[in-house]
Amino acid sequence: TNCKIIKEGQAEILVLEKNVFYNPVQEFNRDLSVAVLNLFAKEKHQELTDKENKKSSTIEKDEKENLQEQPESQNGIRILEALSATGLRSIRYAKEVPHVKQIIANDISEKAVESIKKNILHNKVENLITPSHEDATMVMYESRKNRFDAVDLDPYGCPSIFLDGAVQSVSNGGLLLVTATDMAVLAGNSPETCYVKYGAVSLKSKCCHEMALRILLQHISSHAGRYGRYIVPQLSISVDFYIRVFVRVYSGQIKCKNNTSNLGMIYQCKGCESMTTQPLGIKKGNAYRLPTGPPVDQICKYCKNHKHHIGGPIWLGQLHDKLFVQSLVDSIDDMKLGTQKRLEGVLNVVLEELDTPLYYALDRVMSIVRCDTPAMVKFRSALLNAGYQVSYSHANKISIKTDAPNDIIWDIVRAW
Ligand code: SAM
C-alpha cells in the first residue's frame, strides 16, 4: 500500500515509505559492481575453458596447487551477496550479469529478508536468486567446502568482522567485492580505532582516501594469508563517502610470501608532511630480505626541522590491474548504466594513474611553504621537464602522483 517502486538498472524494487535499506546514493557503487561482475563472469567463463585445455601441459607448483581444486562452477558463476538489504544488488546481478548460475541474497534482518523475497518475485528471478536469513559470517563459514565465485560485502561502516569468512568462502581465482564506509576512521581521525578495526594505523593526510584503500587492502590480504591465500587487486575506488575494492583471491603458499614486499609502513614528517614508504620485505630472486628503515624520531631530511609520524602497515602493491580496467572501460560502452558518464570519468582517470603509492595535494604543498598555488598544469610540466612521471589520482582532483623523489618535489616548490 505505502509502497514506492524504484527502478535502478534493470531491477525494480518495492520500497516502503520508511524503508531504511534503500540508499540511492549507492547507485554508482552498484553500477560499478554490475560492470565489474559482468567482465569477471565473462573472463571466468573464458578461464575455465582455457584451464581445461591447459591441464595436461607442464605447470608450476603454485599453479598445480590451484588446479587441484575443481572449478566450482562448470556452467555459470555463483555469487553471495552477504548483506543484501532489499535484494536490489542481487536482482541487478541476476538481470545484468551473464553466466550466472545462482545468487544467494542474505541478510540478518527479518524485515530485510521479507523485502528480498517480495522483490525476487516482483522481478521474476526466483530461478536465479535464493533468499537467505542468516548471520553473514555463518553463511560464509558454511560455504567453505562449496565456495562462491564472487562474494560481495556491502556493510554499514566497517567490513572487518566479515573478512575472515569471506576470504575462505570465495573460490580460487574468485572475486571479493568489499565496501567500507567508515571513512573518518580510515582517513586518520582516529588512528587507534583504525588499528583496532583494520590492523593498521591511519594518518591524517591529503592522500587519506588512497591511504584508506591501501589500509583496507592490507587488511584483506592479511586475512587471506592466514589460509594460504593471496589477493590481486583488480580495481580500488574511492568516491563520495566510501571506498570499494575488487580483488581476486588465489590459493598458493609460495605467492603468499610476497605479502611482506607488498606491505609497508609510512613515515610522514610532522612539519613538511613529506611521506616516505618503507616496505616490510624486499624480494631478491626467491629470497626475502628484512629491510632497514629510518628511526621514527629521526629529523626529516627535507625540512630538517621535524620528526615523523608512523602509520601503516599499508598495501604498497598495485591498486588496480590496468588490463582489467581497460577491458572494463571497453565493456561499459554499451551497458547503459544510470551513472555511466561518471563511471567512464572515474575509470579513465584510474587508467592513467601511476602505480607509485600515495600522492601530495598541490594546494597543501604550497601552503606549507606559504606560497600561492600555481596552475596545476605548470606544476605538472615542471615535474615532467625534470624527467619524472606525473598523474592524478581518481581520489583527489588536485593530487600530484609522481615517481619524483621528495627532494625534487621540494626543489620545484622552492623555485616557484
Ligand atoms: N547491499 C545493499 C544494497 O546495495 O542495497 C545494502 C546493504 S546495507 C548497507 C547492510 C545490510 O547488512 C543491512 O541490511 C543489515 O541488516 C545487514 N547486516 C548487518 N549485519 C549483518 C550480519 N551479521 N549478517 C547479515 N546481514 C547483516
Image: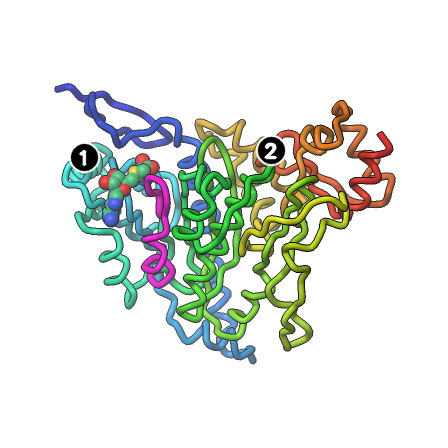
Task: Kindly identify which numbered label has been placed on residue 30.
Answer: none
Q: Quadrant of residue 147?
A: bottom left
Q: Which quadrant of the figure contains the N terminus? A: top left
Answer above or below: position of 273 versus 214.
above
Left-right relation of 366 to 349:
right
Answer above or below: position of 339 versus 154.
above
Residue 167 magenta-highlighted = yes
Answer above or below: position of 95 versus 307.
above
The percent coordinates of residue 97 (x first, y second) are 39, 43
Give SS at disc 1. Answer: helix
Q: Which residue is mark 2?
A: 396
The mark that comes first in sequence, 2 or 1, is 1
- Residue at 57% across, 37% down: 347
Amino acid under label 2?
A: Asn
Q: Residues within 10 Å of mark 1 (few under 14, many from 20)?
A: many
The percent coordinates of residue 68 (x first, y second) are 41, 76
Give SS at disc 2. Answer: strand
Left-right relation of 340 to 411:
left
Residue 158 magenta-highlighted = yes
